[in-house]
């Protein structure tokens, strides 16, 4: 209010009419009342901002907690899935190794049989050659 009176008096001292000086003072008071923030406005804004920040902090903490729990659950599920996959792979590998072992044993048995036959043929041929040689040497 003091500023309005001082402004009015300053305008009057430079020969501004009463109507114009009053209009300027009224416009200034109106603008100050509607456009400028008061200490109460700023205090209310401060309180509202603090409340918003606290609410945001609580919501963020809750979100982080939920994310942590979800991540732990996902990791646990992945761990179980990985263990199951490893178990399946282990069983499959054992079955493949068993099949390979059986196939290798069958191949070895087949080779033994072929070698035995070849050895028999070679032994028979050697005996035949020796007998023929003895016949030729003995008249």
Image (tube, rainbow, N blue to C red):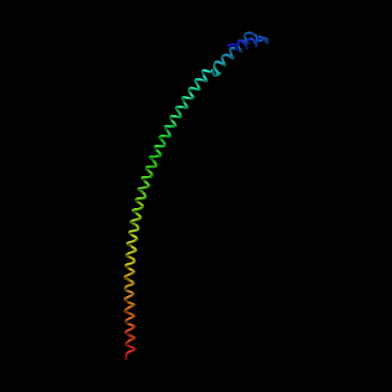
Query: Is 21 placed above or below 89 here?
Result: above
* Quadrant of the drawing holding the N terminus: top right
In this view, 139 is above or below 46: below
Percent across and percent down for residue 139 are 32, 91
Residue at the (32%, 82%) spot, across then down: 128
Residue 74 sits in quarter: top left
| Quarter of image, res 12 | top right
Q: Nearer the viewer, residue 130 or 107?
A: 130
Observer-nearest of 88 and 16: 88
- Could you say which quadrant of the image residue 11 lies in? top right
Considering every residue shown, the one lying at the far top of the view is: 18
Q: Residue 4 appears at what percent x and percent y?
A: 60, 12
Farthest-out residue, bottom = 139
Q: Is residue 84 above or below residue 73?
A: below
> Which residue is depicted at the point 32% across and 86% down?
134
Task: Using the image as rendered, state which of residue 133 and residue 24 is in the foreground.
Answer: 133
Give x and y (percent) for residue 84. Answer: 35, 48
The residue at 34%/89% (across/down) is: 137
Q: Is residue 110 left or right of residue 16?
A: left
Q: Residue at x 34, y 63 (%)?
A: 104
């Amino acid at each position: 209010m003091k500023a309005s009176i001082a402004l009015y008096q300053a305008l009057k001292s430079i020969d501004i009419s009463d109507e114009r000086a009053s209009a300027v003072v009224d416009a200034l008071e109106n603008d100050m009342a509607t456009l400028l923030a008061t200490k109460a406005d700023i205090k209310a804004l401060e309180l509202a901002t603090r409340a918003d920040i606290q609410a945001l902090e609580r919501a963020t903490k809750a979100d982080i907690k939920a994310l942590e729990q979800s991540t732990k659950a996902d990791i646990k599920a992945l761990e179980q899935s990985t263990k199951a996959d490893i178990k399946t792979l282990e069983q499959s590998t054992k079955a493949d190794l068993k099949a390979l072992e059986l196939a290798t044993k069958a191949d070895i048995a087949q080779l033994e049989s072929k070698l035995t036959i070849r050895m028999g043929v070679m032994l028979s041929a050697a005996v035949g050659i020796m007998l023929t040689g003895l016949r030729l040497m003995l008249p």
